Each structure stands twice: as structure tokens, then as C-alpha cells.
């Protein structure tokens, strides 16, 4: 009987908060990698006009390379990944590959990929990743004067 009297008192904090907030689950950073290989990677920082075409020049990391996928129906793109803060920051660039929908298998294809990302003040390296594997390490990362 005494426990029934304490129940409303113990449940007041839950009512006062409205509801319980569940933790936010972040989207998976690393996705499935369908790439068979890659080559010709380049990364450098240039100062380019901001998106409003004003005379303000923003440092931008430009990354390009080639990704080999199983068939011509696949798509590939680059995405900004996490930064590893070691002695000098190491920026991860993620290759995103999407398989074709319902197409018959074809011969492997090479896709040119490029990405523009906000630049850090300095880089120890840029690491190109696909899935949980490393495709390339680019260092040094030169800056335009």
C-alpha cells in the first residue's frame, strides 16, 4: 500500500520533463565500398571566391582522383569525413559508391571524382577512404600562395 503512494511522487520527474529524450544515433560515417580500385589522387588547397561571388577568397581543399567500379551503372562521389587530430591534422575524404538499380552486369568502369571542401589551416595528410579501407594517402597537401 505504501508503495502505491510513492509511485506518483517518484514519477513526477518524468512528467515534469514531458518525455524522455533518447540519444541521437548518428548516421554511419563509413558506407559499403563497391570500388575495385583507385588511382591518380591529388589534393591541394586553393583560395577561391565564396559562394556569393564576392571578392572574399576562402581556402578550399580540392580533391580529385579516379575510382574503378564493377560496372558502368555505378556512381561514385567524394564526401568529407572526420579529421584525425594527430601532430598535424589528417583529413579523411570518403568515397561513396552506389550500385546500379536492376541493370545487368557490365565491364568495370573508371569514374573521375572531384570534391571541394572547406580547408583546415594545415594538413599532415589527406586520406582517401572507401568503406573501412584506405585507398590512398596524399601528403604533402600544398597550398596556393
Image (cartoon, rainbow, N blue to C red):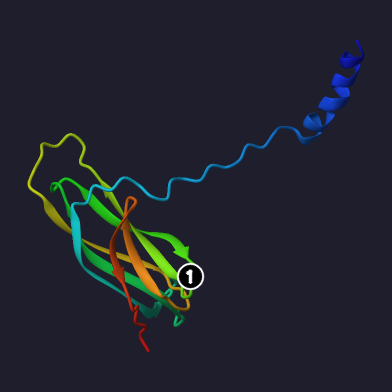
Q: Position of residue 19 (x, y in %)?
A: 71, 32
User: In the drawing, does residue 73 fall left or right of residue 139?
Assistant: left
Judged left or right of residue 59, residue 13 is: right
Residue 69 located left or right of residue 42 = left
Above or below, 14 relative to 36: above
- From the top left corner, tell me how far across and down residue 98 is, in percent: 26, 45
Q: Quick check: 20 above or below 25?
A: above
* Residue 91 picture quarter: bottom left
Q: Residue at x 36, y 80 (%)?
A: 46
Q: Along the horizontal axis of the image, is 34 left or right of 55?
A: left
Number of marks drawn: 1
SS at mark 1 in the image: loop
For label 1, the crowd category at 10 Å Cα-Cα, with few meaning under 14, some 14 to 19 and many 20 or more, is: few
Q: Residue furthest left?
A: 107
Q: Quadrant where the N terminus lies?
A: top right
**Residue 67, visible in the rendered structure:** no
Q: Nearer the viewer, residue 112 or 54?
A: 112
- When the figure is inspected, residue 99 is found, relative to residue 6, above or below; the finding is below
Residue appearing at x 32%, y 58% in the figure: 129
Residue ID at (32%, 50%): 131
Task: Please tell me which residue is depicted at 44% across the width and 83% down the height of the picture.
Answer: 55
Residue 14 in sight from this viewpoint: yes
Give the quarter of the figure containing the C terminus. bottom left
Residue 128 placement (x, y as % from top left)? 31, 62
Residue 134 in the image: x percent, y percent?
Answer: 30, 59
Label 1 sits on residue: 86
Residue at the extreme front: 87
Amino acid at each position: 500500500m505504501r508503495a502505491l503512494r510513492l509511485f506518483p511522487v517518484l514519477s513526477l520527474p518524468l512528467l515534469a520533463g514531458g518525455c524522455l529524450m533518447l540519444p541521437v544515433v548518428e548516421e554511419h560515417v563509413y558506407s559499403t565500398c563497391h570500388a575495385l580500385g583507385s588511382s591518380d589522387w591529388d589534393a591541394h588547397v586553393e583560395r577561391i571566391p565564396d559562394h556569393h561571388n564576392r571578392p572574399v577568397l576562402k581556402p578550399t581543399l580540392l580533391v580529385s582522383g579516379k575510382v574503378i567500379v564493377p560496372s558502368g551503372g555505378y556512381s561514385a562521389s567524394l564526401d568529407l569525413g572526420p579529421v584525425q587530430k594527430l601532430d598535424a591534422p589528417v583529413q579523411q575524404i570518403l568515397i561513396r559508391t552506389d550500385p546500379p538499380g536492376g541493370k545487368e552486369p557490365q565491364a568495370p568502369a573508371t569514374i573521375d571524382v572531384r570534391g571541394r571542401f572547406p580547408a583546415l589551416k594545415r594538413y599532415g595528410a589527406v586520406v582517401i577512404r572507401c568503406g573501412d579501407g584506405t585507398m590512398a594517402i596524399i601528403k604533402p597537401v600544398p597550398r596556393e600562395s
